[in-house]
Image (tube, rainbow, N blue to C red):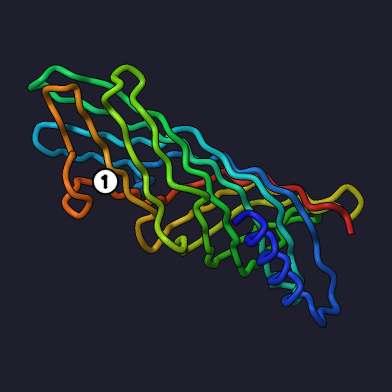
Amino acid sequence: MKSKIIILFFVITAFISKGQEQRATFGIQYKPIIPSKYFNSSYQNSSQFGYDFKLSPQYSNSLGMIIRYKISNIFWFENALNYTNRNYNLELKNNNINISDDNNFNIRSYEIPLQLLTYIRVSNLWYVNAAFGISNTILASDVQSYGNNLSGFMQKFYRKSGGYRALLANLGMEYRDEIKGHYYVGLSLHFPWSETGRIYPEFSDGNNIFNDTDFDDKFFIEVPGSYVTLDLRYFFPN
């Protein structure tokens, strides 16, 4: 799967750059993911038969490489290859049987974003950038994990088959020096059009059993997958 994604990235890069007379700029980026309830970034509260679940995203990050293609003096085209590791905490409570526990797990994915960028020059070396586009994300695998205190508490995350698509929006400031390179800091919104996967929690202590049914009838929690990132980028001198 990893090799197929990398090959796809370079195929897209080669296709876009074919016949391109104007230069391209290569860079690297690191993006801490900021949990934000305002954008519904996977905060979920669900209940079933007295079992209360709270899904909370934890500190996560994304890193990768990015290529810009100059279309005109105002517009650039960007595509990239990003590896993202998202960390989650799933809390379980049931006051009727006096249990409480939490479960930590992470979801890894590979993303190919495509964006159109424009900018406004505000001083000699400083620019304000804005970009919009879409991305295709492939989740690396399904995930199973267990509670930190109760051995009978577990969750199974099933990724969406074929990955998912998302809307992208970005705004930031950039310092451009033709000798030292370009330094960029900004904020990005990653907003999927649909759920990214589903979590199926289970619990059993010998006397109490939860979600032990046929798969089609199981209780599940949708994972929306939207998030906001702080973008830190560096573009090498040409």
Q: Quadrant of the N terminus?
A: bottom right
Quadrant, the C terminus: bottom right
Residue 153 sits above or below residue 230 on the image = above
| Residue under numbered circle 1 | 221
**153 lies left or right of 52:** right
173 or 27, which is in the foreground? Answer: 27
Residue depicted at 84% across the width and 50% down the height = 181
Which element type, helix, strand or loop, lies under badge 1?
Answer: strand
Residue 204 screen position, x and y as percent:
20, 27
Task: Say which residue appears at 66% left-offset and 64% top-offset.
Answer: 79
Q: Nearer the viewer, residue 178 or 96?
A: 96
- Point 48% across, 55% down: residue: 190
Residue sitting at x 52%, y 37%: 60
Relative horizontal placement of residue 5, taking residue 71 as reference (left or right): left
Q: Is residue 116 left or right of residue 94?
A: right
Task: Indicate the quadrant where residue 193 lies.
Answer: bottom left
Name the amino acid type tagged 1.
Ile
Residue 104 position, x and y percent, is 40, 29
In front here: 208 or 23? Answer: 208
Please identify the quarter of the rendering in which residue 130 is found.
Answer: bottom right
